[in-house]
Amino acid sequence: MTTQRPINQKRHYLALSGGIGGAKLVLGLSHLLQENLYVVANTGDDFIHWGLHISPDLDTVMYTLAGLNNADMGWGLADESWNCLAAMKQLNQDSWFQLGDRDLATHLTRSHLLAEGHSLSAVMDILRRQFAIKSRLIPMSDDPVRTQVNLKNGQTLPFQQYFVREKCIPEVRSFSFIGSATATPSVAFLEALHDPALAGIIVCPSNPFVSIDPILSLPGLIQELKNSPAPVIAVSPIVAGQALKGPSAKIMQELGWPQTATRVAQHYATFIDGFILDQQDAALQSAIEQEVCKVQVAQTVMKSLDDRIHLAKICLDFAQTLLRTKDTP
Amino acid sequence: MTTQRPINQKRHYLALSGGIGGAKLVLGLSHLLQENLYVVANTGDDFIHWGLHISPDLDTVMYTLAGLNNADMGWGLADESWNCLAAMKQLNQDSWFQLGDRDLATHLTRSHLLAEGHSLSAVMDILRRQFAIKSRLIPMSDDPVRTQVNLKNGQTLPFQQYFVREKCIPEVRSFSFIGSATATPSVAFLEALHDPALAGIIVCPSNPFVSIDPILSLPGLIQELKNSPAPVIAVSPIVAGQALKGPSAKIMQELGWPQTATRVAQHYATFIDGFILDQQDAALQSAIEQEVCKVQVAQTVMKSLDDRIHLAKICLDFAQTLLRTKDTP
């Protein structure tokens, strides 16, 4: 018996990503894969600001792939100006979330296309083409799923208010993904999952709680990952007990989790076949392999473009070694 | 018998205005009257662009009264930047209507306040206060009335497409004010008309067809002007057969009207008590007085702020001499 996969068919890969941390690896993957890469980004951070639909993670990935991202700030566009924001302040409008003049064009275009009835998936496909991005850029869902931060003081905050306005200072009790129970993964996401050429799914080194969990909260999604013939690997966002960027380690502490890569591997244990651990955490390898899955030790700290491409190559090679049973003849 | 009007009460005035030409006189009036001036602006030019509600005439008046208008362009803000527009062009979005980065703050604020359920009147009152404008700035209606240009070639165009995109080049057969039959004047407009302290109504030197006629098209409005105890005066937008700004004279020609101030006076004949004629057209005075109403000859070409204030003073003084019968004890 032979598989249905034609010989010499291109291998396609699917990356699950949040914002900046994930976007670094996505950039490396896109250099290797171009149109053979699907990127599904978290939309739990999406919100309405100044009446516009803002998709922080999708845009961070998009600007990164277009080579237009502001590397210093970690969000938004390079070579940005802030004249509209200054005028909004003069009009006494909210200014805690900063939208640059050039960035506004993305939000205006997205918002009016959504108002005209396009799905978020369709809008992002239009935008990524305008930015000449060959990889597919896909929202996790076209339905609204909104990450809510439940604080230890009993209050709740929409994610961006916690993340940007409150600078992650309030202590977190838990997160809720409002709307996820009735949301469905986007059609393009499901098509990627069911692509017969899919050779690997990569969970990027994004925040597990606020970037990856919203994706995993979609009904049936974890089962889709379990059922996929393609192996699933995750790259640790925790290196030597620290998050390289963002509040992951602080949140782990507040949730009472050990601040270790091991705990992240355990979090993904039901659906991953492989885990990439930073070389600084090599001592954790045997424990994770015993408890969770195969481990690849690598340099996961990505400072240069070469670092990004190097880690991407390791992901692809690692996935090759992890072919799931269903996928072999 | 005495009137109901208290002695020594402030005199209030109401100006009806389009964009740039009208805004010049409105600025002069506001210097003299401050909070005792109501300005009602045409909203027939309003349209949706980039998903935002644009109110060209209201904004031209607002920016002029705030001292922030771009005098060189005749629209928009001084000291403007165009980075969002450049980014919109890169995203292949419409760029024939130019929105500057600072100007965008006005449209964003208006659009999201409208989406939250505020009326256009309420929004403009919020905006003019943010711009520290003491005069009231009032849209003619909170209902949508949209000026449509009916061309001689049989096509129709929304006003801004005719005015900005097509640069007024196509020949005009007529104008329609879509929605006016079911629109009502805004509550604030009616309150201004019924203000017991109203001492004069001034039709600014705006385009009669596309700036003043949309206001006059509102059901009952001409009757309101006829019934007002306050005298109504109009300032000619045509000087020596030319429009000082905009396409008035060209449109008059295409409609088969004589390109004269006399024809404008005739157009307003049913409700005006006085007409202000430019000194270059002094020869028309007796004919207009014979056929239409009292005439004041003045320098109506406003180059400096002093010119604006001077003409405003002439308007107020002229109105004083024209007290309507109902208004006298």
Image (cartoon, coloured by chain):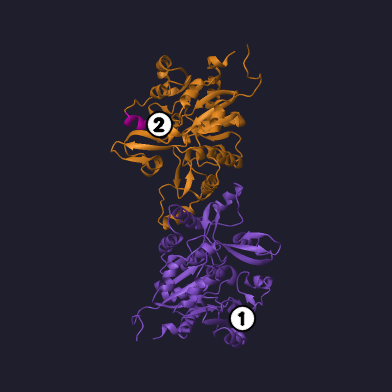
Chain colours: A purple, B orange
* Relative to A266, residue B119 above or below: above
Label at residue B51 = none
Label 1 chain ID: A
* Residue assigned mark 1: A262
Of all residues shown, which one is farthest toward the right? Answer: A153
Q: Is mark 2 on a helix, strand or loop?
A: helix
Of all residues shown, which one is farthest toward the left? Answer: B153
Query: Quarter of the image containing the N terminus of chain A?
Result: bottom left
Determine if the magenta segment contains residue B143.
no
Which residue occupies the foreground of this view, B24 or A321?
A: A321
Label 2 chain ID: B
The residue that appears at 40% across and 63% down in the rendered structure is A129
Determine if the magenta segment contains residue B252.
yes
The residue that appears at 59% across and 79% down in the rendered structure is A266
- Could you tell me if residue A113 is visible in this image? yes
User: A134 left or right of A235?
Assistant: left
* Residue assigned mark 2: B209
Instruction: Categorize mark 1 by other alpha carbons within 10 Å: few (<14), some (14-19), many (20+).
Output: many
Q: Where is residue A173 in the image (x, y as percent from the top left)?
A: 67, 67
Residue numbers of the magenta segment: B248-255
The residue that appears at 67% across and 66% down in the rendered structure is A172
Of all residues shown, which one is farthest toward the top? Answer: B1
Q: What element carries label 1?
A: helix
Give the distance between the C-alpha atoms of the residues marked 1 and 2, in whole angstroms: 74 Å
Which residue occupies the foreground of this view, B318 or A35?
A: A35
Instruction: Categorize mark 2 by other alpha carbons within 10 Å: few (<14), some (14-19), many (20+).
Output: many
Q: Position of residue A52 (x, y in %)?
A: 52, 54
* Relative to A181, residue B181 above or below: above
Going by the numbered disc 2, the residue's amino acid type is Phe
User: Mostly what secondary structure, the magenta segment?
Assistant: helix
